[in-house]
Amino acid sequence: MIVLTTVSSKKEAIFIAKKLLDKKAAACVNFYKIKSLYFWKEKLHKEKEFQLIIKTNNYKKVKKILLKHHSYDTPEIISLKFNKVYKKYKKWIKNSIKG
């Protein structure tokens, strides 16, 4: 599965990615700069953020780490299950998260 989240800075993206990898909650984390428009507390916000794409098979572990280390009060934590995935890649994810 893929879990998506956004964070406020590159520093936070790297910090969270390393936590997820060190704790074997993710096999790989991609991140890139984005611009977001959203409502928060009845006000429109425009922010520069970083999107994280987390490859995992353990949503609960990823969610726990994100909630512990994320700087946002209400972080985006969205899980997308793989519809189809290359068999060797799926095995690599599984083996990367063991432990």
Image: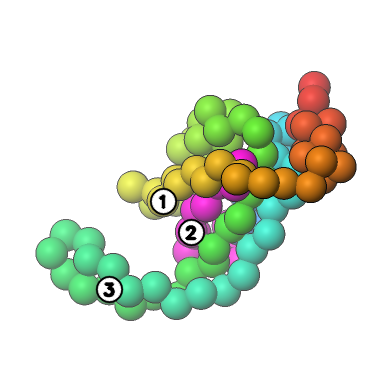
Q: Kindly identify which residue carries mark 2.
A: 6
Q: Kindly identify which residue carries mark 3.
A: 45
Instruction: Quadrant for the N terminus, please.
Output: top right
Q: Kindly identify which residue carries mark 1.
A: 76
Nearest the viewer among 70 and 38 is: 38
Nearest the viewer among 96 and 18 is: 96
Q: What x and y, as percent, mark residue 86? A: 79, 47
Q: How is the image coloured?
A: rainbow
Instruction: Indicate whether 30 appears above or below 66.
Output: below
Q: Which of labels 3 and 1 is toward the front?
A: 1
Q: What x and y, as percent, mark residue 20? A: 67, 40
User: Do the residues bearing badges 3 and 1 touch, measured as CB atoms within 8 Å?
Assistant: no
Q: What x and y, as percent, mark residue 2? A: 59, 47
Q: Earlier in the sequence, mark 2 or mark 3?
A: 2
Q: Can residue 69 be seen in this view?
A: no
At label 3, counting other C-alpha atoms closer than 10 Å, the crowd grade (few under 14, some 14-19, many 20 or more) is: few
Amino acid beneath label 2: Thr
